[in-house]
Image (cartoon, rainbow, N blue to C red):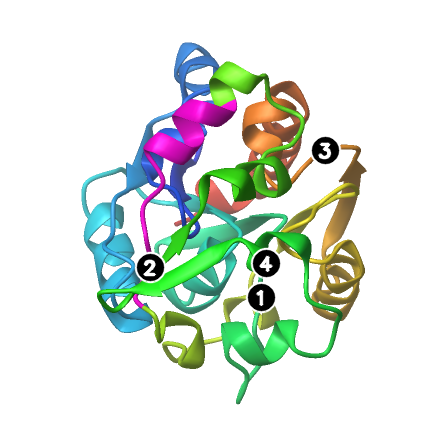
Amino acid sequence: MPTKPSIVFCHGIWADGSSFSKVIPQLQAEGYEVMAAQYGLDTPEGDVAMVKRTLGRVGSPAILVGHSYGGSVITAAGTDDRVVGLVYVAALANDAGETSQSQQEKFPVTDVFKYVDVADGRIWMRPEGVVCFAGDLSPQEQQVVWATHYTPAADLFSRNAPGIAWKSKPSWYIVANNDRTVQPDLQRFLAKRMGATTKAVDSSHVAMLSQPAFVIDVIREAARAVRGASATV
């Protein structure tokens, strides 16, 4: 039986699994089995299915770590019996009847959405939008984030896959205080609603890139907390 849970990362829009590149090596060095689920941002149902396939490629039990839209993904995928904990990073976390879009509509529109184009059925971020998305990265890193941004389907936020894992699984939430993509007030509301262990950091939306040590510490805390469950799964 593993002494540490596996960790599966779930990315947001305008990103893929490489957005966790600064946290994966350290966790691997500490003996965690880690994978980043690579899904297509086409439908929530398809993205959740890919996460469950990824769970089949790592040892159980596992912690899901979701960034941004990835929080909606882990909320549904986390109902899988192989999942013992959830870590949200500046993330959405829907309740029954909510979508990714409806969560955000209760709060003022953030700056990044001033810099998007809808074309060919996808939502593209303009180059100037990366300052809102990843404002505390170096200009060189921002350019890489923009050049590699992975575009979601235009209707992705209008639906959600079924399942509300945070109602039955322990959760942790990292609030990004300087976020200009997901409203920090929305983040605090969601964290409080789910009863998550909440940590706040002065970062942009991409805390795992700008404050990787902080994110790693929260994942470690979650792993220690669920280790007792790991021994019995």
Q: For the magenta stretch, what is the residue range?
A: 142-153
Give the quadrant of the N terminus.
top left
Residue 93's mark? Answer: 1
Vertical placement of residue 226 versus 97, above or below: above
Vertical placement of residue 86 versus 3, above or below: below
| Identity, as a three-letter code, of the amino acid under mark 3 | Ser
**Which mark is nearer the camera, 4 or 1?**
4
User: First in sequence: mark 2 or mark 1?
Assistant: 1
Disc 2 from disc 3: Cα separation: 23 Å
- In which quadrant of the rendered view does residue 119 lie? bottom left
User: First in sequence: mark 4 or mark 3?
Assistant: 4
Extreme residue toward the top, this view: 29
| Identity, as a three-letter code, of the amino acid under mark 2 | Pro
Residue 203's mark? Answer: 3
Disc 4 from disc 2: Cα separation: 16 Å
Residue identified by numbered label 2 = 152
Element class at badge 3: loop
For the residue pair 207 and 167, the one nearer the viewer reads as 207
For the residue pair 2 and 119, the one nearer the viewer reads as 119
Horizontal side of 200 relative to 169 (left or right) equals right
Q: Which residue is drawn at the image coordinates 56% and 30% (left, top)? A: 208
Residue identified by numbered label 4 = 114
